[in-house]
Amino acid sequence: MVNYEDQVKQLEEELTKTDYNKRTQHHIGLVKAKIARLREKDEQRRSGGKKGEGYSVRKSGDATAVLLGFPSVGKSTLLNALTNANSPVGAYDFTTLDVIPGVMEYQHASIQVLDVPGIVRGAASGKGRGREVLAVLRSADLVIILLDVHKPDHHAALLQEIYEAHLRINQKPAIVKIKKTIRGGVRVGSTVTLHHIDEQTIKNILNEFKMSNADVLIREDITIDQFIDVIEGNKHYVSAIVVVNKIDSASEEQIAMVKQLIHPDIMISANKKSNIEALKRKMFDKLEFIRLYMKEPGKMADMKEPMIGRRGNTLQDVCMKLHKDFVTKFRYARIWGKSVKFEGQRILKLAHRLEDNDIIELHMK
């Protein structure tokens, strides 16, 4: 039996010994492509060609956030501090045996918060039900990476597990188009100057993925890793916040050291409920919520209870949220706010993108 893990380790060791520069770029690109291919084969072998099953979680509210961390970092305590959930709390590993949901209400938004079992090193490879836990993140809108202030080394380990589970945090898919062709070799076009990858490296990587004929169009400066992600096409992109817990049990020197080491987004004490309101605000901002106010024709807008949307939402998203029939019955909308050129502008297209604090008056057939 082929030992893919050993082959991957050998190639990763080779990467650590190779300094990145223009001269070594082609070689590094090829090695990273080989690692990606080996991991792909290893996953197929482990799963028998089937995709791994995650925990079954019914999504609710305006967005879903997942608490992710190693065992005993305080996920259950934090869930209880953020929501009305009643998650079992204990000072021992693997207290959480299932996914436990709670609902956090903040600034009129309803955020579903999920407490999942703690993962262990090797989770992305299937250890300790890690694959099932990490699979929950694929349908999440936000990941809260929770760390123990006394174990800052867990930060790098968690990021590695997340990365190997095909999850990309705080990133967007690279703007790259790859079109397979019958002949002509690989042709590369770019609308920007590329600093981290060149044409020969692109050809080497595509060749490793058995793509000898293709048209490639790159519209942003990308890295080798981003290009490989585009080829594989199996990555999930999700926002994340790094939270350090248990600061009530740490000295000022420890806290300062952790801040300098991992640069967390926020430090809290879930047990003492310190900085919980600040964390709620960060979650709200990271989810890029927008507040939309509905108005009936001939009446004043309801400015007390906004509809909560997400940045980038359109009139079609609003119609779908109100009732699916509103999409087919839509005639036009009048909008007051930042998304229009003048107040009360008549908008005929459902694709119109909305902005925070827009007032919307829908007219139906």
Image (tube, grey):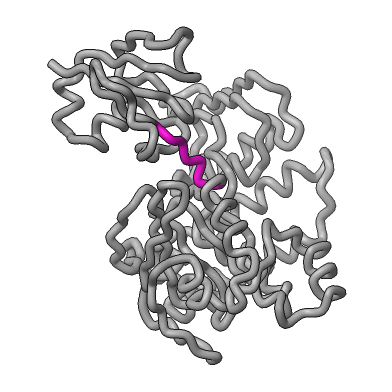
Residue shown at the point (45%, 51%) measured from the top left: 141
| In the image, residue 36 above or below residue 311 | below
Side (left or right) of 347 relative to 255: left
User: Where the C terminus falls, by quadrant?
Assistant: top left
Q: What stretch is highlighted in magenta?
A: 286-292
Residue shown at the point (31%, 56%) measured from the top left: 59
Q: In which quarter of the image is residue 4?
A: bottom right
Is 33 inside the magenta-drawn segment?
no
- The residue furthest right is 253
| In the image, residue 109 above or below residue 51 | above
Q: Quadrant of residue 74?
A: bottom right
Q: Where is residue 323 in the image (x, y as percent from the top left)?
A: 18, 35
Is residue 282 among the parts visible in the rendering? yes
Side (left or right) of 228 relative to 62: right
Side (left or right) of 19 relative to 133: right
Q: In which quarter of the image is residue 54?
A: bottom left
Q: Position of residue 292 (x, y in %)?
A: 39, 32
Is 289 inside the magenta-drawn segment?
yes
Q: Where is residue 122 in the image (x, y as percent from the top left)?
A: 55, 75
Is residue 7 among the parts visible in the rendering? no
**Front in this rendered view, residue 232 or 246:** 246
**Front in this rendered view, residue 214 or 259:** 259
| In the image, residue 10 above or below residue 106 | below
Count the numbered circles shown.
0
Residue shown at the point (41%, 48%) measured from the top left: 109
Q: Position of residue 88 (x, y in %)?
A: 42, 84
Residue shown at the point (14%, 21%) measured from the top left: 329
